[in-house]
């Protein structure tokens, strides 16, 4: 048996979003090397030689529906990887792209996902500490449609802007994974659900994160260097470095493969221990 056969993805139908760049592009390239049949969704052009690609704005339900109709009747794995930075004043759009569309696509495809299949999301280490926001998150997760979730976001826009819509969307993703692991729609077909929470990674969104941070600070009359703030927050504490997209693609594909056949309901922090550092800091602060 070849090593790649252990992944169990040869000839399998795999759906991945955000595959035009960054972590998802690296994941799509790996999936192709593992002989999967890859169907890619992105607003931008997908240059990886996938089975078929679709240009779609993941913030628009009608566009998602049009693509869903063209996907295979049987799907073995779904990788939801698309997302945008938390631009100030765009809280509803951030929620639609970063969470609402991801949940909608996954749940729309559930009837087609084969027994023992998988759904894997990209969250963020920005979603760390989701438990502290559980009351608000659980209220949001109680929405059961794309429209209802959008209405909730519009009605809680002030809160989203105050808390950072990007952070809330990522916390909601982690909470969704945790809360759905034994839900009938997943467990009855033994469909595993997991996510990874990347640390600072060099992708096409890196500049967006820096600029969004600068714009957010400017709204409060504060001038900052977004890139410097990110470095100080994520890297300077441990003399670190930013990750390459491939370093997130590897664990992402692993979680969605047969190699992780008994792993479900997990948020895998891929941040070179930043979450562990925060855990210890929180314990020290509680003393």
Image: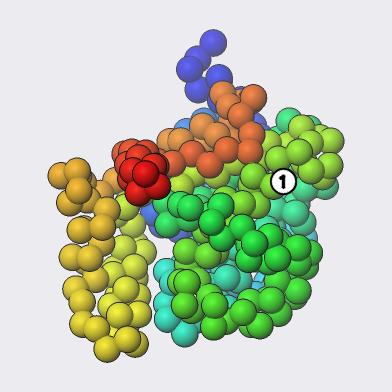
* Residue bearing mark 1: 180
User: Residue 11: horizontal and vertical position, in percent?
Assistant: 64, 32
Residue at x-position 57% and y-position 81%? 157
Quadrant holding the N terminus: top right
Q: Is residue 67 visible?
A: no
Marks counted in the figure total 1
Please, what secondary structure does the residue beneath circle 1 have? helix
Nearer the observer, 56 or 126? 126
Q: Determine the residue positioned at 69% across, 47% down.
A: 179
Q: Nearer the viewer, residue 286 or 65?
A: 286
- Residue 35: x percent and y percent? 55, 32
Q: Position of residue 180 (x, y in %)?
A: 72, 46
Query: Where on the picture, by quarter, is residue 64?
Result: bottom right
Position of residue 2 in the picture relative to residue 140 (left or right)? left
Q: Is residue 131 left or right of residue 114?
A: left
> Residue at the spot x=50%, y=15% of the render?
2
Q: Position of residue 4 (x, y in %)?
A: 50, 22
Closest to the observer: 20 or 229?
229
Which quarter of the rendering shows the C terminus?
Answer: top left
């Amino acid at each position: 048996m070849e090593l790649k056969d252990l992944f169990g993805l040869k000839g399998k139908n795999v759906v991945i979003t955000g595959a035009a760049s960054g972590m998802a592009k690296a994941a799509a390239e790996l999936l192709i090397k593992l002989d999967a049949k890859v169907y890619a969704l992105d607003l931008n052009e997908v240059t990886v030689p996938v089975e078929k690609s679709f240009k779609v704005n993941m913030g628009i339900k009608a566009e998602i529906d049009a693509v869903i109709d063209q996907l295979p009747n049987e799907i073995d794995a779904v990788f939801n990887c698309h997302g945008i930075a938390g631009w100030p004043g765009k809280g509803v759009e951030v929620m639609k792209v970063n969470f609402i569309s991801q949940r909608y696509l996954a749940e729309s495809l559930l009837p087609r996902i084969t027994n023992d299949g998988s759904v894997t999301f990209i969250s963020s280490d920005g979603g760390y500490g989701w438990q502290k926001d559980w009351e608000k998150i659980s209220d949001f997760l109680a929405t059961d449609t794309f429209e209802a979730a959008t209405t909730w976001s519009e009605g809680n826009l002030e809160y989203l802007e105050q808390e950072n819509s990007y952070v809330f969307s990522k916390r909601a993703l982690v909470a969704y994974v945790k809360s759905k692991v034994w839900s009938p729609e997943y467990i009855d077909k033994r469909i595993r659900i997991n996510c990874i929470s990347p640390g600072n990674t060099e992708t096409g969104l890196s500049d967006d994160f820096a600029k969004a941070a600068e714009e957010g600070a400017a709204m409060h009359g504060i001038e900052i260097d977004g890139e410097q703030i990110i470095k100080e927050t994520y890297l300077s504490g441990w003399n670190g470095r930013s990750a390459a997209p491939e370093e997130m693609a590897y664990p992402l594909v692993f979680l969605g493969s047969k190699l992780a056949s008994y792993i479900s309901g997990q948020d895998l922090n891929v941040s070179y221990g930043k979450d562990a550092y925060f855990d210890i800091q929180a314990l020290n602060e509680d003393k």
